[in-house]
Amino acid sequence: MAILRMDHVGIVVEDLAAAIAFFAELGMEVEGQTPVEGRWVDQVVGLDDVRVDIAMMRTPDGHGRIELTKFDAPAAVDAGPPNAPANTLGIRNVMFAVDDIEEALARLRTHGAALVGEIAQYAESYRLCYVRGPAGIIVALAEPLG
């Protein structure tokens, strides 16, 4: 059986610079940024004449990566209502462990993030919250306790 490893999570955004700033505020680092187009891209994504700008970001420990993609052509489409609720089908959140949830939330608010619910504690293990991030995605924050 082949070994399976997660490479990255892809997020389509309208404003690439704002999304980069948002995730940088969490402590992620830009690994690379480039425009991408060509027949091979069209073949992979199943669209014609694709032109995108991509930024690959990684966590400081190097174990997690996200790919932020802004479509120049064809234009990005909405997958549902803006600010879709947490029970919407499909990938709804990306979770990050943080040392101080209030401090992380305060930093993200300067980039337009808003709490989806409220900060809650799960047993003696975690303090957790959901915040609305770039392109309406939900970014979950988890502060380990103890």
Image (tube, helix red, strand yellow):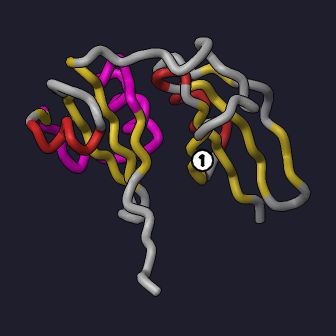
* Above or below, 21 relative to 58: above
Observer-nearest of 40 and 19: 40
Residue at horizontal 78%, vertical 54%?
126
* Above or below, 74 relative to 36: above
Residue 38 in the image: x percent, y percent?
A: 9, 36
Q: The magenta stretch spans which residues?
A: 12-35
Q: Quadrant of residue 114?
A: top right
Task: Say left or right for 86 vs 105.
Answer: right
Residue 44 in the image: x percent, y percent?
A: 25, 44
Observer-nearest of 13 and 41: 41
Residue 105 in the image: x percent, y percent?
A: 61, 32
Q: Which residue is mark 1?
A: 95
Q: Amino acid at mark 1?
A: Met
Residue 31 inside the magenta-drawn segment: yes
Q: Quadrant of residue 41?
A: top left
Residue at horizontal 66%, vertical 42%?
101
Residue 144 in the image: x percent, y percent?
A: 71, 58
> Which of the image's four quarters has the C terminus?
bottom right
Residue at horizontal 47%, vertical 22%?
135
Q: Residue furthest bottom?
A: 1
Residue 28 inside the magenta-drawn segment: yes
* Above or below, 105 relative to 1: above
Residue at horizontal 10%, vertical 38%?
39
Task: Say left or right for 27 vs 46.
Answer: right
Task: Say left or right for 134 vs 68.
Answer: right
Q: Quadrant of residue 80?
A: top right
Q: Is residue 73 visible?
A: yes
Q: Is residue 110 visible?
A: no
Task: Say left or right for 58 vs 146.
Answer: left
Binning the other alpha carbons within 10 Å of mark 1 as few (below 14), some (14 to 19) or many (20 upward) gives few
Observer-nearest of 62 and 78: 78
Observer-nearest of 131 and 7: 7
